[in-house]
Image: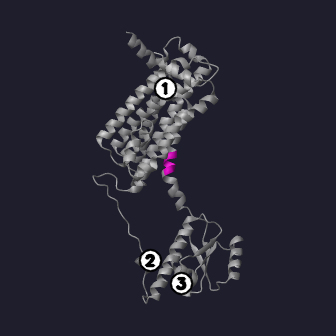
Amino acid sequence: MKRQQSLGRTFLISRREYLERVRTKTFLITTLITPAMMLGFMFLPDFFMSMKTGGAKNIIVVSDDPAVANAFKSEIEKNKEPKYEVTLDQTPTPAERLKLDSKVGSRAIDGYIWLTRAALASGKLEFHARSASNFLVIDQVQHASSLAAIQQRLEKGGIHNVDTASLTRALTIRTVQVGGGVTDPEALFTSATLLVLILYMTVVVHGVAVMRSIQEEKNTRVMEVILSAVTPKELMAGKILGVGAVGLTQIAIWGLIAVAFMGAGIAAIRGQHLYFTPIVGIFFIVFYLLGFLLYSALAAALGAMANSDEEAQQLQFFLVMPIIMALLLIGLILSDPSSSASIALSLVPFFAPVLMYLRIVLEQPPAWQLALCVMILIASIYVALAASARIYRVGILMYGKRPTLPEIIKWLRQT
């Protein structure tokens, strides 16, 4: 009977936490803005790359070899975006260099390339431009000058009338993952990055929400009124369940939005750059729940120890830092998901929600590793909840000063 009453009170608290959050404008805004941000992450890079770069580029080719200069001019003018207007200059002198530098500085021209016989022989060319950050232009200039140099070397060797562009055309490689799965590296990278970022955002944001909710009620002394009707353990459990349900609601809404976009045919625009399967979706929910429970247990303890907003913000460091460290290790997992280091790191409880999930997206780990990871997380959650409950029941009624480490250890020892 007492157990049923306890569960009933826990449910009422979780229901209150849930309804209090889903009815706010903040919930609506964040739920809608997050998919918009993800779509922007997918579409905006291509959109900006496809934008016009502001008219034709005026380039001067300084060379004492007319054949090489004309070959460069012919090749670079094949680019459709941006367009190039190329002028040939056959006086490669120091005075001419100073004159052209002045023109670049005054914006009369966009740049000039020093394409002399001596520069070609050394293999080191100079391209003078107003900006050294326009990587598209620099890449196109380098490509055109390389083809012109190859053509000159072939003609010196007695080989004439050769299509150097066809001769030097690179091969494309299609990567096939043995045992099935995604075969597009770009799809793999984009999908893994997006899903891990969403997982990180949901776990951290809702974990912090638990902490701030506790700290707010503690500061306003509402906590004292609530504890007259429920136990600290019931209150902590209710808050964790209520905020966790808010996170699941957001994930469900995002899933419906994704299905709607796919039904509208938007996925076809960049479908080749996305990778998602039912298994990936199921494990997303699993690791969200496990990660949230682990971090929210820590958040509850930290929220109970804080006495002000400033203290709560300082203590958030201990909540966010482990998962940020996991994000910093993403590069290691991407390079080799099955390495010993990747396996070991993905089994560390505070890293597992991000790193093990990333391994699942990249390459399905063996079943024993998944089972071991889930068992380690469940055991860690049990220990974290037990420790947090002991800190929570004392800390929520502590005012005036932040507890010291000896005091926290004393709380943990109390039964």
Q: Are marks 1 and 3 in contact (CB under 8 Å)?
A: no
**Residue 25 locus on image (x, y percent):** 56, 32
Quarter holding the N terminus is top left
Residue closest to the far left = 179
Q: Circle 3 — which element? A: helix
**Residue 225 locus on image (x, y percent):** 56, 13
Would residue 44 be found to the left or right of residue 281 on screen? right
What residue sits right under mark 3 in the picture?
68
Q: Circle 2 — which element? A: helix
Would residue 300 be found to the left or right of residue 308 on screen? left
* Residue 338 painted magenta: no
Label at residue 227:
none
Which of the pair 126/134 is nearer the observer? 126
Which residue does the image show at 52% across and 25% down from the upper left?
301
What residue sits right under mark 1 in the picture?
18
Which residue does the image show at 68% across and 72% down from the upper left?
104
Amino acid under label 3?
A: Val
The CA distance from mark 2 to mark 1 is: 63 Å
Q: Which residues are magenta?
A: 37-41
**Residue 107 locus on image (x, y percent):** 69, 70
Quick check: 180 above or below 71? above
For mark 3, does the 10 Å Cα neighbourhood hold few (<14), some (14 to 19), or many (20 or more) residues? Answer: many
Quick check: 14 above or below 72? above
Residue closest to the far bottom = 158
Closer to viewer: mark 2 or mark 1: 2
Quick check: 73 above or below 331? below
The CA distance from mark 3 to mark 2 is: 14 Å
What residue sits right under mark 2 in the picture?
165
